[in-house]
Amino acid sequence: MRTGQLEHNCSLDDILAHLSETSFSAIPDDAAERTALITADIAACIVGGWKDRAAGETGDFVIENGGKEESTLWGRGKKVPAAQAAFACAVSARAFEFGVVDCDAPGAEFKPLHSAETLVPVALAVAEKSGSSGRDVLAALALGEDLAARLTAALDFSLPLDCRGTVNAVCSAAVAGKLLKLDEKRLRSAFGLVLHQLNGVRQGIHYSLGQGIAAHAGTSAALLASRGLLGVENMEDELAGLVHALGAAFDPAPLFRELGKSYFSSVTFKPYPCCRAAHGAVECGLELLRQGLSPESIEHISLFVSPWAAGHIVARPFALRTEPHADAAYSLQYALAGTLLRGRCTPDCFTDEAISDPAVRELSGRISLHAEERPDGIFLSTRAEARTGDGNEYSAFVRIPRGNEHMGDALTLEEKKQKFTTNLSFGLSLDSRKAERIWEMFRKLKELDSLTPLAEAMRP
């Protein structure tokens, strides 16, 4: 099989038929339940995300541009055109690096995937515009998440790219097209139209913008297809050429393996609002505190990470550069120092005021980073060795940070609920009882005839 080409016995039409014909009743119960939890997680991240400067400015931008009031900016209450709502809400969903990530498709378990932070905002926006039910939303998202996981397994980028400009945009078209009830022909056009908008650009300083751009691309493609606009004619050839241009290897087998039988999805419910590569540092900090380490007594901490993490942006020395939130969210030193000083790692630890705390910067300067090989290949494992001024020593080791449903310790349902209510309280200053009532609405999403009650409940 040559790179970038489909096997002769596989067809894109098989995927289009699967997307078009599969109804909620065909989605396995466990996949529907998982999708509902993912939807709740990301919706709450949208609400909390507006506190980030880039997300707030993006929301203001689409509101000021106006247009037909079709879909809600969740947590802000304003209505804007559906594609604009998907764009801004996806930016907000990623803003605090708190959304559910990764996936469980065989071959993709260790590839970075941020699909849900794009696909859920698309589903919420298009469902509100089209009057779709909760069951419609769950079906579209289960299919879109599954496709995203399969594409991630099928693609192997040799360049330092991630999913946002490629996988997310294509799967946004799938989710939007499903909710718009496009038939196979128009769904093919939606895919063809979104091809014009794919890119391989890496995430930048405002890392969340790529999530929104992909959401807008996919939503717009589906909406144009619903009006009868056509995509490229020979889409398979165009896809092969694009894969080659992006420097990716492509194995189509994961796209079709048990299609319609196994449903894959995002699988790591983040317990901390920062890059997943820094979660081991957070948990080392919490463990050191449990052992009785006093932050004021620390003379030096050596933090040992895998060679992969040592080469990641999180290994940069913590400093306030052009965008403080990105500087902190992608910093091992900030994750450890902030956790030791505050005893927690929550969204309020990533406000501009918290990030600029001189005590955090001072303690970060006493943390040195070191790469060490991991015999078991677990690249997120982290070890901390702390020494105090009076000569006492403390140590902590985290093999796999919490949150992944299949590797290490998963979050309990109660912890997922606590994360949800924390985000709503942070973004909307809601009391815990109202936040819990909204959580229960999401838990019963499949029973809702429309999303209007949820959108109204999450107004400021």
Image (tube, rainbow, N blue to C red):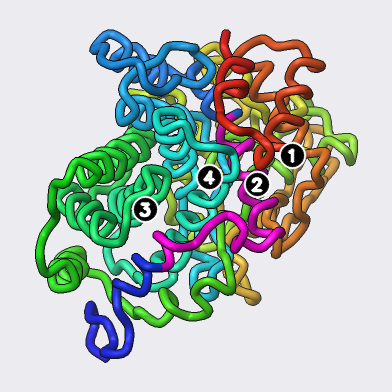
The amino acid type found where label 3 is placed reads: Ala
Q: Mark 1 points at which residue?
A: 416
Check if residue 190 falls in the magenta segment: no
User: Is 341 situated above or below 260?
Assistant: above
| C-alpha span from label 4 to label 1 | 23 Å
Instruction: Compare marks 3 and 4 and give the one earlier in the sequence.
Output: 4
User: Is 150 situated above or below 100?
Assistant: below
User: Is 214 situated above or below 382?
Assistant: above
Tell which of 310 and 237 is nearer to you: 237
User: Is 272 situated above or below 52?
Assistant: below
> Which element type, helix, strand or loop, lies under badge 2?
loop
Residue name at image x 46 percent, y 31 percent: 131
Q: Name the residue under label 2.
A: 269
Q: Mark 4 points at which residue?
A: 136
The amino acid type found where label 2 is placed reads: Phe
Q: Tell us which disc is closer to us: 1 or 3.
A: 3
Residue 117 point in image, percent of width and height: 47, 40
Instruction: Compare marks 2 and 3 and give the one earlier in the sequence.
Output: 3
Residue 319 point in image, percent of width and height: 44, 28
Q: Quadrant of residue 324?
A: top left
> Which element type, helix, strand or loop, lies under badge 4?
helix
**Label 4 crowd (10 A; few <14 / some 14-19 / many >=20):** many
